[in-house]
Amino acid sequence: MGKLAKGVALVGAGMSKFGNHFPVKRNPDLWIDAWLNAVESVDNGIEPKDIDACYVGNYSSDLFNHQGHLGPQMANLVGLTPKPAPRFEGACASSGIALRQAIIAIVSGIHDVIAVSGVECMTELPTAGVTDVLATASDSLFEYPAGATFPGLYATLASAHFHKYGTTAEDLMRVGIKNHENGAENPYAQMQQSIKDMMISKRKRYEEQGREIPDWSDEFDFLKSSANPIIAYPLRLFDCSLITDGAACLFLTSEEKAKDFTDTPIWITGTGQGSAALSLHDRDSLTSFIATKESARQAYQMSGLKPKDIEICEVHDCFTIAEIVALEDLGFYEKGKAVEAIKNGETKRDGALPINTSGGLKSKGHPVGASGAGMAVEIFKQMRGIAERNRQVKFDVEKAMTHNLGGSGGTCVVTIYQK
Amino acid sequence: MSEMDKDFTIQSYLEFLQSKKLMGSKCKNCGILYVPVRKLCTKCNTSNMEWVEMSGKGELAAFTSITVGTPYFIEKGYDRKRPYCFSIIKLKEGAMVSAQLVGVEESKPETINIGMPVKVKFLETEIKGETKIDLGFEPT
């Protein structure tokens, strides 16, 4: 596999606010918010007539909203019909796949400018319904009858990681604490509060209600308490990402067209996609995702970069354990060593390798089909130095990565960005 | 038709399970074992299988204790106060399967040990007057 046969540029990126929006906002409303936000980010402006196709990533509007065939619906809302508007599905990696397919289409010469859409409205269903829809991204034939839920599958992987590498519940908590600290600085995030602030406000509420004030000494103490119930041992509520409504929009162009839109494009230099057996029991490893390793291998080879070259990365932290496993599978740390790096603060905003500066799926939110495109929005901002509030990293980012995992690791898309 | 002549389909596997048999398909060409069943061997790209019954012995490879369960398990009577264990079992014959782990203290998951020996237990659930059999394992 060589380099991309043609340059591909990211010239604009935006997103709706992620959150609990239904019924005030549904898929069409969220998508228009993301579109407008992305249009605003294009230096020289962009109009529907400049765009050749609309690639839509969405996991399950069919089950969440009783609406299939989302491609043309989204395209029409922003004035892109009758242009091609395919929809891509790969569970939580749906818009990562849409992004990758847009890259491939541009390199092929079929299209020059593509709007990539990621969209999902989950809260139309109650939590139990959402859990059931998410479970269809795992194996319905053999895992589901054995009682598997989505948190349950990641908890099972966590148990194997704990057993093999000595990882602990506190190691998981550090991931959540860090991501919430980042999300607190993101005006588009669903939960803009650090876990420490959440603990303090909870204590204050107890005080106001005249209840016994809990004696939590720090965030870890708080996270080990009944305020953070177990969902699937060893995962607690704050180890799980959120149920979210949201959309994201990316504008990709060929190298020749990029200059029409901006003098400072972000170049996409690597893309990779991998797959794995849907059922965990059909895989060789329970502590590593082969789809991540394969997609990373392809993207690194295509870009000519190595793990040590990547300066920031948005990884797929649908559960805290997933961030730890991703950091290992992407080659940033040896197996079993990521927790030590996290403990040393290496993955914080001011660390050697900032991870999930957006707040990640944990704090920014996880509208599953929109999450992959949402990651690219954060990378676009960080590379341009325009990340809001206090979360812009303090160096000029030249090489970055997004890692978008689908389901319990059956699909993965990795993308590398350079200036 | 002998039951060993059943086609290598999901339905055949589930029918075996209903008669409390954990069956796999073994490639006559390269000897690889598939549990649950597969008709096509992806190791040697042939479809020359034979049914083999598992001993039902194995060890616990990974597990979780679930407090917020699926609708099916809620129907079975599990909830936050009565969690259940989802597990992955490595069979003595080498393949891994997903199964409910029973006979353990689900509310004290820290007492459950990965690597511990387990044996198959076919779990019966009454649904609308019919008995459904699901795959389970328990400590030996």
Image (cartoon, helix red, strand yellow):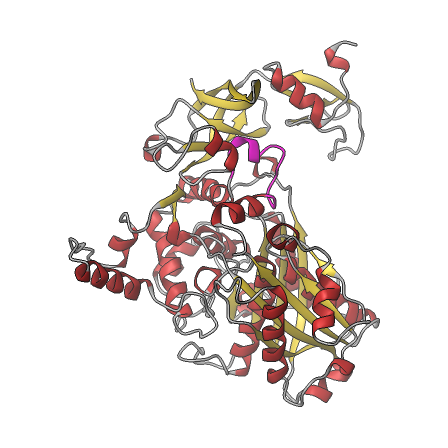
Q: Quadrant of residue A173?
A: bottom left
Q: Position of residue A216 (x, y in %)?
A: 20, 55
B115 is higher (above) or lower (below) than A29: above
Give the overall secondary structure of the magenta segment: loop
What is the magenta range? A136-148
B1 is higher (above) or lower (below) than A226: above
Q: Is residue A217 left or right of residue A404?
A: left
Is residue A3 something that shows in the picture? no
Q: Is residue A59 left or right of residue A156?
A: right
For residue B34: magenta? no
For residue A146: magenta? yes
Q: Nearer the viewer, residue A260 or A87?
A: A87
Is residue A113 something that shows in the picture? yes
Q: Position of residue A336 (x, y in %)?
A: 44, 49
Residue found 79% across the figure and 75% down from its top: A52
Quadrant placement of the N terminus of chain B: top right
The outermost residue toward the right is A110
Quadrant placement of the C terminus of chain B: top left
The outermost residue toward the front is A23
